[in-house]
Image: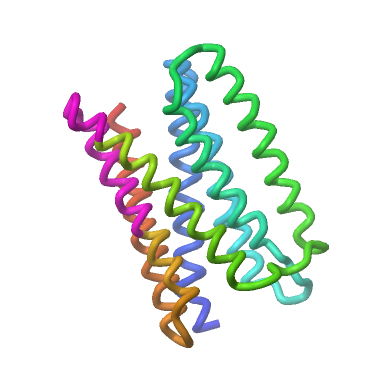
């Protein structure tokens, strides 16, 4: 139990923060009807569920729950749709993107429900690639917000830049665990989660100011 204390606390905190961000994003979307806020809200909801799934799979030992498929793919898909929301600004594109995001999120949830029957990841290389994809996507989002801040210099774009800078480096630290050994793997994993927590905090601060 002692070895799970820090991971459990981080998973619980990530769940609460991501869920709160999701609720805030959907609330603001209801007022502004901004498609990007809908995509952000749905993405944060899936991220909250990945944190909850990680917590449950680490603590429930009576059955085997292979939630890593949902954890990695669900997070990668969520970040990808946020990145795709910056590709174009047309209404038709956003309508298509929102529908595609809903479908992709449902498919990701299927991986969660099938967790007791899914096989474990075949090897470490697959984990590293899927984990690294989250880092690359978040860096892509970071570049967009840095560009937005340089052009308009708003508080929102600054906080979002800080948020995705921390999220990107958090995922980069998590990626390092696949190249370490022994206790260093857990240290990288925990350090990555803590860094991401600060990133989600900055993201929440940005939304509260909208």
Residue 23 visible at all: no
164 relative to 152, above or below = below
Q: State left or right for residue 192 relative to residue 22.
A: left
How many numbered discs, if any? Answer: 0
Q: Which residue is located at x 46 percent, y 42 percent?
A: 20
**Image point (51%, 27%), residue name:** 38
State which region is magenta. Answer: 147-169
* Residue 97 position within the rendered picture, expressed as x and y whole percent measured from the top left: 58, 25
The residue at 44%/33% (across/down) is 24
On the rendered image, what quadrant is the C terminus found in? Answer: top left
Dominant secondary structure of the magenta stretch?
A: helix
Residue 70 in view, yes or no: yes
* In the image, farthest residue toward the top: 91
Q: Quadrant of the N terminus?
A: bottom right
Q: Which is more toward the observer, 81 or 41? A: 81
Answer left or right for 55 relative to 10. Answer: right
* Direction from residue 194 to residue 110 in the image, left or right: right
| Residue at 77%, 75% in the rendered image | 62
State the image coordinates of residue 198 (x, y, percent, origin top left). 32, 55
75 in the magenta segment: no
């Amino acid at each position: 139990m002692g070895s799970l204390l820090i991971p459990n606390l981080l998973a619980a905190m990530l769940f609460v923060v991501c869920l709160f961000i999701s609720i805030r994003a959907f609330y603001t979307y209801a007022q502004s009807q901004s498609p990007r806020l809908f995509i952000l809200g749905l993405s944060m909801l899936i991220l909250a569920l990945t944190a909850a799934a990680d917590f449950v799979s680490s603590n429930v030992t009576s059955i085997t729950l292979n939630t890593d498929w949902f954890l990695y793919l669900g997070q990668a898909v969520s970040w990808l749709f946020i990145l795709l929301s910056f590709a174009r600004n047309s209404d038709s594109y956003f309508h298509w993107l929102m529908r595609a995001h809903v479908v992709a999120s449902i498919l990701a949830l299927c991986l969660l429900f099938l967790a007791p029957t899914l096989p474990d990841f075949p090897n470490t290389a697959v984990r590293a690639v899927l984990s690294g994809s989250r880092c690359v996507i978040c860096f892509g989002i970071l570049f967009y917000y840095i560009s937005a801040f340089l052009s308009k210099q708003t508080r929102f774009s600054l906080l979002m830049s800080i948020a995705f800078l921390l999220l990107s480096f958090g995922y980069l630290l998590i990626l390092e665990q696949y190249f370490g050994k022994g206790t260093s793997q857990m240290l990288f994993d925990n350090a990555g989660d803590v860094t991401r927590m600060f990133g989600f905090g900055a993201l929440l601060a940005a939304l509260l100011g909208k």
